[in-house]
Amino acid sequence: MPLLEVENIVKTFRRGGGPEVRAVDGVSFSIESGETLSLIGESGSGKSTIGRIVLGLEPPDEGRILFDGQDLTAMSPRELRALRSSITAVFQEPYESLNPRMTVEAIVGEPLRLFRRELSAAQRRDRVIATLEEVGLGERVLRRHPGDLSGGQQQRVGIARALVVDPRMIVLDEPTSSLDLTVRATVLNLLRELQERHALTYLFISHDIATVRYFSRSTGVLYLGKVMEYGPTHELIDEPRHPYSVGLLSCTLSADPDVSVPAQRLEGDTPSPTTRRAGCPLVGRCPVELASCSAAPVPLMPISPTRSAACLRLAPTEVVA
Amino acid sequence: MTESRILQVEALRVAFETRQGTVHAVNGVDFDVRPGDVLGIVGESGCGKSATLRAIAGLTQPPGEVTGGSVRFADRELVGLSRRSLRQVLGKDIGFISQSPFGALNPILSIEAQFRNVIRAHRRATKRECREIALRALTDVGIAGPDRVLGGYAHQLSGGMAQRVVIAMAMVHDPRLLLADEPTTALDVTVQRQILDLVTGLIAEAGRSMVLVTHDLSVVAQYCTRVLVMYAGRPVEEGTVRQVFKSPRHPYTQALLAAVPRVGEEIRGLSGGLPDLIDYPVGCPYAERCPRATALCAEEMPAMASCVPGRAAACHHPLEEVASYAAS
Ligand SMILES: Nc1ncnc2c1ncn2[C@@H]1O[C@H](COP(=O)(O)OP(=O)(O)OP(=O)(O)O)[C@@H](O)[C@H]1O
Ligand SMILES: Nc1ncnc2c1ncn2[C@@H]1O[C@H](COP(=O)(O)OP(=O)(O)O)[C@@H](O)[C@H]1O
Ligand code: SF4
Ligand code: SF4
Ligand SMILES: [Mg+2]
Ligand SMILES: [Mg+2]
């Protein structure tokens, strides 16, 4: 049984009487315990909103979230609170997500104060120190403030804070986007180690395809709040089949100067998320679009035993050339 | 020889006075740019990339100061020029693009008015002529509805559109040299791709040149002709992109390349950080993190040593050169 099942979630926002934004528009996926699912997509595609819904920070307008078989959307606030320490999060900007006036000890100890009230101050402190050691920081940073730490160290504090309550799942929302290449590599390797050691389940949100490829087993590609394609990461990245995935992946550049970049396949910019679309969201940018594409919603359908895509051109046997 | 270099940077130094002491941000940077070159400058955060680029463009601001060295643009010394003489060169022969387009645009002036200011800084033009120039410049950067953009304000633009407007403004006077500091870092890959294709296309068109600061090695691999790797305010390696990426000689360059996620390979990070730039080390600034370091490294600063013109590394114990890439 998957640890997390997300069924058909929808979330709309309306900013100050303005037009409605369908940030998440009928998204479903599941993650097996101990595995990593990545969500990739351009900014505004709904990745963070999905993460916030899974974390219970935002109620969905429609749909269900099953965690370990329990429906989060049907829980009382008290039951939800008890679950808060089972799913934690690491966010993109370590500095912004850590209170600059608190010491590292207070930051990492805070979730324990909230969710492990049975612990004494001394037990709490031991736990904080042990966790800091696990993320490669140790006791010496206890009294320091986030501002005195490098970006990589700040993100390690963020990871310690997510780890200290012994969660089963962590939502990683662009955890390495603001870090330097060499620091990013150490943080990614740390996250992988921790996953193995604690059998953690990750929802990994990123727009960096090289990182996703290194990190996760399966991947969903999002566009304007909808999943365009879903499948095993390596298959999907090496041989994308949905026209949007093909276009997105053609924009990722190789760090090998001898591997040249393919010609770009997507035309124009992402349209405004407030525009209502009856059919496929890619209509207007798709190089292989059909007249029927704008008629009705295009559902996510299996296109092979391991993969699915939402495209009228992709019957189970057909491939977009 | 000199005529073929559009930009010559020699022994450039930049320091920032802070309460803790003097931060030696740039400590002797040398490089040349020739017409048609797209030079990438890479290195980790804080290594002095932006400080170098801003010094070249005469944009160093207090508490920062250019404390030494020379910047020759088309054989004219820029270091020490008065603000007024500098302004004749900047924005005209040298264009500058920064990471945040919204920081570069004025939020309360219409895009058209900002174009007018940019144009009139270096030539006389009527309102109507300015509008025509601006429309053409916007069309050149691939903006479909240029009249609508001209009448609007910065906040009405997406990040990608705003960066295109900034590029269009930077190209208005047909600069020979474009300096770009992380021009696409804040943008999505799809937009990054469009913008880099566009800018490097404009550069290649007329034998212009560009210096591109980035922390993204794949941007360098795909869009630059040459690369300069910096560490702690010093150049540590330079060469053509193929030379440096296929056969790095400096251990720091090797570490950078090992951190790029690649199919089927483990990535390796780098622990520790830059040395203290206030109390600058006497020896090699990379010594504390370097697996090849010896006693010599801690005592003596290695200088950039080159065997072929344009190819150099600053290391006492450089990595073996892969012969097939030596000349490429
Ligand atoms: N205004 C300032 N006051 C004090 N120190 C500064 C100032 N601006 C930059 N520095 C210091 O100068 C050094 C070089 O900074 P610079 O901005 O050039 O780095 P960079 O290589 O561009 O880094 P990044 O990749 O983060 O943009 C750093 O140690 C930085 O802290
Ligand atoms: N609190 C909010 N209020 C209004 N609109 C929002 C809010 N949060 C997100 N959105 C909108 O929802 C869409 C998806 O946003 P987000 O989930 O942050 O995307 P991503 O993380 O993929 O960049 C965007 O159009 C965004 O502007
Ligand atoms: S459904 Fe139509 S418009 Fe959408 S991706 Fe497929 S072919 Fe293109
Ligand atoms: S000089 Fe020494 S410490 Fe510096 S990079 Fe070379 S081997 Fe390493
Ligand atoms: Mg986000
Ligand atoms: Mg910078």
Image (cartoon, helix red, strand yellow):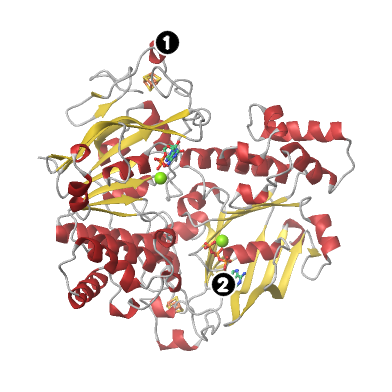
Q: Is residue B140 above or below residue A104?
A: above
Real-space CA distance between mark 1 and mark 2, rounded to the nearest whole angstrom: 57 Å
Residue B63 place in picture, x, y as percent: 67, 73
Q: Secondary structure at mark 2?
A: loop
Q: Is residue B169 above or below residue A125?
A: above
Residue type marked 1: Ala
Where does the N terminus of chain B fall, quadrant-wise? bottom right
The crowding category of the residue bearing disc 2, from other C-alpha atoms within 10 Å (few below 14, some 14 to 19, many at least 20), is many
* Residue B295 appears left or right of A55: right
Label number found at residue B233: 2
Label number found at residue A291: 1
* Residue B5 appears left or right of B22: right
| Some atom of ligand 1 lies within 8 Å of the CB belonging to the residue at label 2 | yes
Chain under callout 2? B
Chain under callout 1? A
Q: Secondary structure at mark 1?
A: helix
Residue B279 place in picture, x, y as percent: 54, 85
